[in-house]
Image (cartoon, coloured by chain):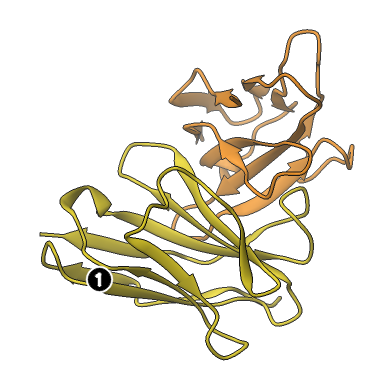
Chain colours: A yellow, B orange
């Protein structure tokens, strides 16, 4: 079965640094998402992306965050100036249709901000 | 605002016993409800959704709009059912899923 691929699996960074988390969605999917899970808390929606633009974003997704699909296969999440509270597991997901369709999740990137 | 509540953080049952993982939601419109599962060292994956009305791996869930619940049930638990289970809600016209905090199911041999 095709899978969503995320790299790296772990990322350690200093507070204030920029990080880019990478994802390769399933090739025929049209909708792309980023979610995050802070340790011990809920999986939280960050952003959805469709037709090369953001279709929906949460309050968490402020000006420090951005997403891009630079080359038709990769889907990236950039955090410009990381804060301690950005430490979390970040999940990429993709689907053929919107969120009421089956989401396929990646295995996640554990981001640790020191 | 929509919210999903899973009141049990951890549920332990013996193999062969019935399982019920509780999920309640808060949403004023007509929701779509899902159960996602994460087995140890595996990725989050869809188990079932209410719109399909299907049974996956022996699990079923019925949407009860009166009680705003979507409990997950299985008549006879198996050891391989041990995992983290997340209830999630999607609203019409929205791209996002709202997750509950999850329930860790442990099936004791």
Counting from the top left corner in percent of width and height, residue B69 is at 71, 18
The residue under the point 35% across, 72% down is A9
Counting from the top left corner in percent of width and height, residue A13 is at 16, 69
Which residue reaches farthest bottom? A71
Judge from the rendering whether residue B90 lies leftward or rightward of residue A44; answer left or right: right
Nearer to us in this view, B66 or B41: B66
- Position above or below: A111 against B44: below
Quadrant of res A49? bottom right
- Position above or below: A21 against A47: below
Task: Point out the image quarter for the N terminus of chain A.
Answer: bottom right
Task: Point out the image quarter for the C terminus of chain A.
Answer: bottom left
Counting from the top left corner in percent of width and height, residue A95 is at 71, 64
Mark 1 crowd level (few <14, some 14–19, many ≥20, 10 Å Cα): some
Which residue reaches farthest top? B66
The residue under the point 34% across, 75% down is A20
The residue under the point 36% across, 58% down is A63
Chain under disc 1:
A
- Position above or below: A81 against B37: below
Q: Secondary structure at mark 1?
A: strand
Residue under label 1: A11
- Position above or below: A74 against A53: below
How many numbered marks, from 0 up?
Answer: 1
Quadrant of res A82? bottom left
Judge from the rendering whether residue B11 lies leftward or rightward of residue A100; answer left or right: left
Counting from the top left corner in percent of width and height, residue B7 is at 50, 17
Nearer to us in this view, B23 or B15: B23
Nearer to us in this view, A49 or B108: A49
Nearer to us in this view, A78 or B35: A78
């Amino acid at each position: 079965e095709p899978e969503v691929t995320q790299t790296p699996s772990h990322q350690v960074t200093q507070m204030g640094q920029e990080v880019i988390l990478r994802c390769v969605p399933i090739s025929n999917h049209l909708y792309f998402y980023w979610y995050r899970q802070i340790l011990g808390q809920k999986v939280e929606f960050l952003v959805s992306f469709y037709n090369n633009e953001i279709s929906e974003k949460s309050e968490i997704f402020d000006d420090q965050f951005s997403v891009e699909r630079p080359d038709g296969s990769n889907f990236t999440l950039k955090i410009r100036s990381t804060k301690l509270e950005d430490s979390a597991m970040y999940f990429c997901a993709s689907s053929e249709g919107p969120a009421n369709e089956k989401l396929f999740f990646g295995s996640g990137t554990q981001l640790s901000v020191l | 605002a929509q919210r999903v509540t899973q009141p049990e953080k951890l549920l332990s049952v013996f193999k062969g016993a019935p399982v019920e993982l509780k999920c309640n939601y808060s949403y004023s419109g007509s929701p779509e409800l899902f159960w996602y599962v994460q087995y140890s060292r595996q990725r989050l994956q869809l188990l079932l959704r209410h719109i399909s009305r299907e049974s996956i791996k022996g699990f079923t869930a019925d949407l009860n709009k009166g009680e705003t619940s979507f409990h997950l049930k299985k008549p006879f638990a198996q050891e391989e059912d041990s995992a983290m289970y997340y209830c999630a809600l999607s609203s019409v016209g929205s791209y996002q899923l709202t997750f509950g905090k999850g329930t860790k199911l442990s099936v004791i041999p």
